[in-house]
Image (cartoon, helix red, strand yellow):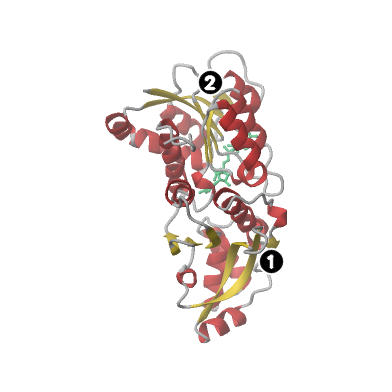
Amino acid sequence: MHIKLALLGFGNVHRALARLLLRKTDVLRDEYNLTISVTGIATHSRGFAIDPAGLDLVRALELVEAGQKLDALHQGEPVRDTLALIAACPADLVMEATWLDPRSGQPAIDYVRAALQAGRHVVTANKGPVAYAYRDLLALAKAQDRGFFFESTVMDGAPVLGIGREALLATDVKRIRGILNSTTNYVLTCLERGIDFEDAIIQAQEIGVAEADPATDLEGWDSAVKITVLANVIMGADLRPSDVDRTGIMATSVQEAQAAVQAGERIKLVCEAVRDDATGMVRASVRPMRLPFADPLSQVQQTSSAVTFETDTLHHLTLVEGDTDPTTTAYGMLVDMINILRGRYRYESF
Ligand SMILES: NC(=O)c1ccc[n+]([C@@H]2O[C@H](COP(=O)([O-])OP(=O)(O)OC[C@H]3O[C@@H](n4cnc5c(N)ncnc54)[C@H](OP(=O)(O)O)[C@@H]3O)[C@@H](O)[C@H]2O)c1
């Protein structure tokens, strides 16, 4: 089977995906009978390129990494914007990895909707569309008989949502708890070691974990968006990030972090979604909590992340992910792509 991909965004994640597709060409052909071409790329400032015969990915990487535009690779009429590229690009599957606006989910929601309406499958690494428009987009995907997968939105490439979709069947997920933001977990680890808040943030920026403006992470917004995704997708909730009871780590000090360790505990920014037994409603929160060393989440240090599911059948199931980078995220997108092509998006069928 030959598959044509359109890439929305060509930043860290999609450049890693391009390299992964080049590296996995033989595996995809020999084990999955898949050959892949990228027929379109959209960016914010590096232009647009469509080539129905397949873009030269090596050249596209070279151009963008040299600070140049992709326009030299484009064949055909000029492309006005990303929605126009979605409409014009001959693609079976649209991969979406543009910027995240954690307070609205746009413009990625519009891109995902347009791609599904045009009859494309969609894979996104962007939390926005799932946190703000999951039910609508899923209904549209079902109506169009197309896949809409988004494994990389939570814990990069770790199969958190795949576990929910494929393995947590006929079970009652009562609670999800997680450490889902690398910047805050890194800063909290530094505080325990006596490094003050400002220096910890600088260190997190130096190793490429924290953004230039880390407020979205430190105030718990990124965590709130991620727990919303988990609550809506795995627990069937209908929350928005603003529904999450959210406290960041701005007020946490070296003294508090070290006092917790002295007492056999660690302060962690815990994301939680809990189903109320009486009402069946799901409540979600993000807040710093002291966890005893015996809690697996307390052992998650530095840039690692983890999630624990509590269900009526598996009781406690914890997944820990370490050493992530854009290739990990790209891998989650690759797995989504393969699963869509294997028909795994037809949830109701056996
Ligand atoms: N980095 C990770 O490991 C990771 C992990 C999980 C999820 N994610 C999510 O994946 C997405 C991409 O992350 P990233 O690290 O690759 O970000 P990035 O390096 O900032 O790249 C974003 C890309 O999107 C392009 N873009 C922005 N607005 C656009 C628009 N309206 N139309 C078309 N392209 C647009 C940018 O264009 P320019 O090249 O012109 O700037 C850039 O190429 C984000 O939503 C992020 O939250 C990332």
Q: Which residue is mark 2?
A: 50
> Which residue is depicted at the point 63% across and 20% down?
79
Q: Horizontal placement of 58 versus 238: left or right?
A: left
Q: Seen from this angle, which residue lies furthest top?
A: 76
Badge 1 marks a residue whose secondary structure is: loop
Q: Horizontal placement of 203 versus 82: left or right?
A: left
Q: Quadrant of residue 323?
A: bottom left
> Which residue is depicted at the point 52% across and 42% down?
150
Q: Residue flagged by tag 2: what amino acid is it?
A: Ile
> Closer to the camera, 297 or 97?
297
| Mark 2 to mark 1 CA distance (whole Å) | 44 Å
**Residue 46 seen by the camera:** no
> Which residue is depicted at the point 39% across and 34% down?
21
Residue 310: x %, y % from top left: 50, 63
Check residue 247 in the rendering and tell me which mark sits there, or answer none: 1
Q: Quadrant of residue 291?
A: bottom right
